[in-house]
Image (spheres, helix red, strand yellow):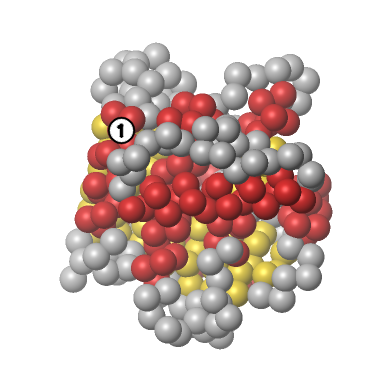
Amino acid sequence: MNYRHQFHAGNFADVLKHAVLLHLLGALQAKEKGLLYLDTHAGRGGYDLTKAAAGTSLAREPEWPHGLGRLLDRADLPPELADYLAAVRAFDFAARTETAAGYTGTVGEGPRFYPGSPWLAAARLRPQDRAVLCERQPEEAAALAAEFAGRRRVSVQTMDGYTAVRATLPPPERRALILIDPPFETGDEWSAILGALADGLARLPGGTFAVWYPLTARARVDVFYRQLLAFRDLPPCYTVELLVGGEDAGLKLWGCGLLVLNPPWGSARPLDALARWLAPVLAQGPGATGGVHWLVSER
């Protein structure tokens, strides 16, 4: 499949991915020591939802109303989702103010601007933390560099994200959260992910790696799991998945997940509750479900 960030900003997959990202980052920052945030497929950092819905040549049905949009007026959000929604609103408010769009900040008004993982993470950096944002596409990388111009603790690199894992690790901080979030444009994406994980774990055995993946008929996640479990000395890891419909629900993309290696201690329980809460709220068909599944238990 081809999963371009700009066309799906704010959809159910972004809700899960970004809520999990903020939770993992916050859990790692419970320790005072600084860390590196490495984003291997950063995109352009933030997205105008009106442009994303326009597509490249034909109008597209916006996806955010079935993801982010279903959370906007809820008063019963779990803490992780309340934190995520506050971050999204803060970005939208700042972006609207910068473009003089007349934003009033009212809760009932739908968002126009949506933050990608680079902005969500960068907004949470402490003085002792830093971020390296990698994007291979020149146009996207240029937009990303422009957005973060002048940010001392944020470095934008126009390079292949998998190469960045080898080039960046181990960091001086000896602590890192690495987000691997590829567009799945090529048939060898799974192999590239496995190679990056092998390289990354060899260079930083204790690093926390989070890999986003789609759940579709063509995405052979089961094969990926088997190959991953063949790693020697695979560290503790779990998957947190959200299915907005079962395999028979008629959806092209019926769910997504994140594989988390070396997760922060105690992070599985709140993320399991998060995914279970989201499943009925973001359901698009029968069979919606969610939760955490351990591949290698904590020792």
Question: Which of 13/172 is in front?
Answer: 13
Q: Is residue 128 left or right of residue 247?
A: right
Kindly identify the residue that appears in the image at 71 percent across and 44 percent down: 96
From the image, which quarter does the C terminus lie in? bottom left
Residue 191 visible in the picture: no
Q: Is residue 175 left or right of residue 104?
A: left
> Is the residue 141 above or below the residue 290 in the image?
below
From the image, which quarter does the N terminus lie in? top right
Q: Kindly identify the amino acid type of the residue bearing the numbered disc 1.
A: Ala
- Residue 269 in which image quadrant: bottom left
Q: Position of residue 40 (x, y in %)?
A: 59, 58
Q: What secondary structure is found at the residue carrying circle 1?
A: helix
- Residue 50 in which image quadrant: top right
Q: Position of residue 274 (x, y in %)?
A: 30, 46
> Is the residue 255 above or below the residue 119 in the image?
above
Kindly identify the residue that appears in the image at 66 percent across and 75 percent down: 153
Question: Which of 194/122 is in front?
Answer: 122
Q: Position of residue 132 (x, y in %)?
A: 64, 67
Q: Which residue is mark 1?
A: 279
- Residue 131 in which image quadrant: bottom right
Question: Which of 297/112 is in front?
Answer: 112
Q: How many marks?
A: 1
Kindly identify the residue that appears in the image at 77 percent across and 51 percent down: 98
Label 1, residues with CA under 10 Å away: few <14, some 14-19, many ≥20: many
